[in-house]
Image (cartoon, rainbow, N blue to C red):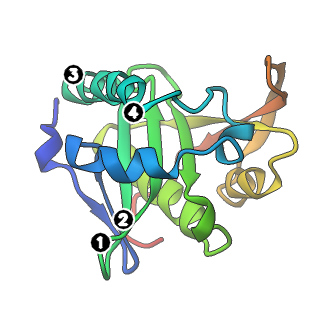
Amino acid sequence: MLLRPTEIQVESTRLLIKPFSANDADATFSCITPSLTRYMAWEPPACRHDFDGVWRSWILSIDDGSDYVFAIRQRADGSFLGLAGLHRVRTESPELGIWIREDRHRNGFGREAVTLVAHWATRTIGCASFTYPVAEENRPSRCIAESLGGIIVESRVTPKYKSVVYQIPRLPVTSEV
């Protein structure tokens, strides 16, 4: 079943998560910094024009249901918090990813957003498990995977850092976070 992006909305008391749209581009680009991306496989886009090509490719993947990039906003005021990803949706164990803007770290938004996306994917797409790659040194992100029952199943060396890959089991289908 292919869902139209406009039909997808995941929320909790604090968060509103929807597929990325062109309306999210300005807020997203303004939060992408070298220090934010130090533990990500990609580098910040050199300019807004470069970023426009990136997010346009996300829209195509969202539209065909193969990959989802979600904008995370605070429910109370609509402020942009970051992005969550559900990548390689058509595989046995899709990949979860998250980044939260630096000035909003340490508020539990990352864990809450990943949990919401995983519950949505379990309920809507039928995902049986998830992979979650993370830099070894990124302790806060590792804690997210571990809090969801993730166990390390692989180690990798990337051009930027050493990483571990967690396997996160299927989450119970629930509306609670």
The residue that mark 1 highlights is 78
Q: Estimate the spatial distance between the alpha carbons at disc 2 and disc 3, rounded to whole Å.
A: 23 Å
Which residue matches tag 4? 48
Mark 2 — residue? Answer: 73
In the displayed structure, 76 sits above or below 52; it is below
The location of residue 68, given as percent across then percent down, is 35, 35
In three-dimensional space, the C-alpha distance between marks 4 and 3, rounded to whole angstroms, equals: 25 Å
x and y, in percent, of residue 162 in the image: 87, 28
Residue pictured at 55% horizontal, 58% vertical: 101
Q: Amino acid at mark 4?
A: Arg
Q: Secondary structure at mark 2?
A: strand
Quarter of the figure with residue 3 = top left
- Compute the Cα span from label 3 to label 1: 27 Å
Q: Which residue is mark 3?
A: 64
Horizontally, residue 41 falls left or right of residue 120, namely right
Q: Nearer the viewer, mark 3 or mark 1?
A: 1
Picture residue at 70% right of the left edge, 61% below the top = 147
Spatial CA span between label 1 and label 2 = 5 Å
- With respect to residue 141, does 54 lie above or below? above
Q: Of label 1 and label 2, which has the lower sequence position?
A: 2
